[in-house]
Image: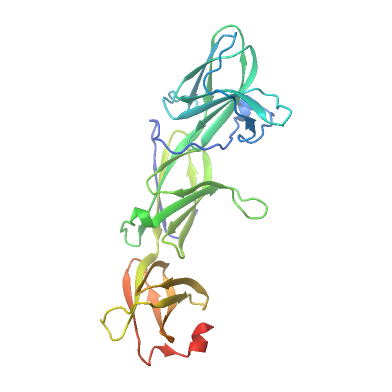
Amino acid sequence: MFEGSLRLFVIALVAALFAVPVSFALAQNANDVGDIKLPGISSYATPKTQGPALGSGGAITLSAQLTDKGADITRGIVWRVFKPQPASDGKLPMVASAHGGTAVFQLDPGSYLVHASYGRAGATKRITVGKEARRESLVLDAGGLKLDAVTSGGAPIPPKKLRFSIYEGQAAANGDRPLIAPDVAPNTVVRLNAGTYHVVSTYGAVNAVIRSDIRVEAGKLTEATVEHRAAEMTMKLVREPGGEAIADTSWSLLNESGDPIKEAVGAFASMVLAEGQYTIIAKNRDRIYQKDFTVVAGQNQEIEVVANEQSAIDPEEGAD
């Protein structure tokens, strides 16, 4: 369910998704790993040399698919092969790794744990290597998520002013949600295991924030577009209506409750604000002026604070 205005479009894509930064989050496949409890993926000992390990056993070919009956993923996978018993330091010894699509390893006979990372999706499986060549596949049960946002009325938002953070859908007992992907740019495809995620969209750097819960389905690309009820405001202090902005002005923005939420210095104070009632306070040469204004969603405005007696306030009152 989205909090605020939200439009969700779901597009099924069976094709492989585009590249995003590699994550080290560990996701177990219960059918393959059973009750095995693995330490975090960071709790392993890196081998001195990376790449397919050479051993006396048969070749093991590893492939991965997004869904149970999906095609093999041809690129973007990070493979890591571990011995299943932790070393004396409590870390799993990593014996081999590879990047790309299908990978072939030559390992000594025995039992291993294989982890496949695909973006921020992943799966783990126990395999057994013998003297004969064999093949194993991992089903990632993963899809993709692409996010964007518009202002009220459908106007696009400049990408540089828009960022997303993706959290786990289930909150912990203390109410916190583990962060999965911070600072995600709009229209970036993020690979994730299937499930529900909590997404926070931030427009600007003050209070224009939309939160929503979005479900990712295996083998599909979910596209979600949220609507920010906000506008870009530019404040300036002038000596008369329509006059030039006065330099060296300090700005303090208060919300409807009178709480300060933003400060700035300069002839202009530009910021994105959620719709609502605000008070702007301008200080210049020990004189303080203020003006109340309203932000209407989708309507960018220039707010003039006129430096006259009507807008002037007592310095001690302004300091409070």
In the image, what residue occupies the spot 41% across and 89% down? 312
In the image, what residue occupies the spot 45% across and 75% down? 253
Residue 138 position, x and y percent, is 53, 24
In this view of the protein, which residue sits in the foreground, 30 or 174?
174
Q: Residue furthest right?
A: 88
Residue 142 position, x and y percent, is 49, 34
In this view of the protein, which residue sits in the foreground, 299 or 102?
102
Query: Which corner quadrant holds the C terminus?
Result: bottom right
Asked if 241 appears above or below 18 in the picture, the reply is: below
Left or right position of 34 against 288: right
Asked if 210 appears above or below 214 in the picture, the reply is: below
In the image, what residue occupies the spot 67% across and 34% down? 39
Residue 239 position, x and y percent, is 30, 86
Residue 222 position, x and y percent, is 42, 42
Asked if 90 appears above or below 282 in the picture, the reply is: above
In the image, what residue occupies the spot 45% across and 65% down? 206
Asked if 206 appears above or below 197 in the picture, the reply is: below
In this view of the protein, which residue sits in the foreground, 254 or 11?
254
